[in-house]
Image (spheres, rainbow, N blue to C red):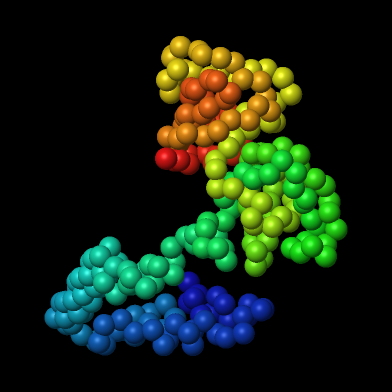
């Protein structure tokens, strides 16, 4: 039978002879692989030494792996484990603002007539005019004393900051064209229904639990499911 080196001797596309590669591999102290022959130059004692040697290597690797896992879990040496690194890797806040208030945030219109401009300044043209005091809007950007707001229809524009109020107002299901929303006596779908609210009705927020909001609509006070209101974020708690 031909040796492995002879089998590949005339093979095209092999830039280096296989026998030269194999001949550089050593097993133990006196074993040399060359072609298909193995010369054994040591007694079984060399095997025992080799086994002990490689056994120590494996044991050391296992110990290091165990220590590495502890270090990683405890955050002792990992970058993520240091307080400064955790702060830098933590999710960024929703936004920062000149006023120090969160962005975005919900506010309401302070006056019954407010000009909405294309840019932050009176030199910018008026895009449209709001004629509804108390309408909830979302502040999405700030520039000096100007605030970029967005309404329930997704329209955006700039308004002077003094024309906005921190009073929390909501619009009942403005995305609905018809139907009715339940105003319950307590924050539960099993509670007594006080009234039914039409889409687009405005209400003043008293508090929100994250799933229900206590609101005032005219002479009525009750609870409305939070996911049916525009003017509060899903899961937001308002006290």
Tell me the quarter of the image containing the C terminus: top left
> In the image, what residue occupies the spot 55% across and 47% down?
166
* Residue 11 placement (x, y as % from top left): 63, 77
| Image coordinates for residue 4, horizontal then vertical, percent | 49, 76
Total labels: the figure holds 0
**In front: 85, or 161?**
161
Asked if 59 appears above or below 102 in the picture, the reply is: below
Q: Position of residue 192 (x, y in %)?
A: 46, 12
Of 51 and 97, the residue lying toward us: 97
**Going by the picture, which residue comes out furthest to the top?**
192
Res 162 → quadrant: bottom right
User: From where the camera sits, is residue 44 visible?
Assistant: no
Left or right side of 66 for 184? right
Please indicate, yes or no, whether residue 105 appears anywhere in the rendered image. Answer: yes
Q: Position of residue 95 (x, y in %)?
A: 55, 60
The answer to whether residue 155 is above or below residue 76 is above
Up the image or down, 223 lies above or below 101; here it is above
What residue lies at 83% left-to-right and 62% top-to-bottom? 124
Q: Residue at x 55, y 85 (%)?
A: 17
Q: Is residue 115 left or right of residue 6?
A: right
Viewer-nearest residue: 110 or 63: 110
Q: Nearer the viewer, residue 127 or 174?
A: 127
Q: Determine the residue positioned at 58% across, 81% down.
A: 9
Query: In the rendered image of this protein, does residue 122 appear above or below residue 8?
Result: above
């Amino acid at each position: 039978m031909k040796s492995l080196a002879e089998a590949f001797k005339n093979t095209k596309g092999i830039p280096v002879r296989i026998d030269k590669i194999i001949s550089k591999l050593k097993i133990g102290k006196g074993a040399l692989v060359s072609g298909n022959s193995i010369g054994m130059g040591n007694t079984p004692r060399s095997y025992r030494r080799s086994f002990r040697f490689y056994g120590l290597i494996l044991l050391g690797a296992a110990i290091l792996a165990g220590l590495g896992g502890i270090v990683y879990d405890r955050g002792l040496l990992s970058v993520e484990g240091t307080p400064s690194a955790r702060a830098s890797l933590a999710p960024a806040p929703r936004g920062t603002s000149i006023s120090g208030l969160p962005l975005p945030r919900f506010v309401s219109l302070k006056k019954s007539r407010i000009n909405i401009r294309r840019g932050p300044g009176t030199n910018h043209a008026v895009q449209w005019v709001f004629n509804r005091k108390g309408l909830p809007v979302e502040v999405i950007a700030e520039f000096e004393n100007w605030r970029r707001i967005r309404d329930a229809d997704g329209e955006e524009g700039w308004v002077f900051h003094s024309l906005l109020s921190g009073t929390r107002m909501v619009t009942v299901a403005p995305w609905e064209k018809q139907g009715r929303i339940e105003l319950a006596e307590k924050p539960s779908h099993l509670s007594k229904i006080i009234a039914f609210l039409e889409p687009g009705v405005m209400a003043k927020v008293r508090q929100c639990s994250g799933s229900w909001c206590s609101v005032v609509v005219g002479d009525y006070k009750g609870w409305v499911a939070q996911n049916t209101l525009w003017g509060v974020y899903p899961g937001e708690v308002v006290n």
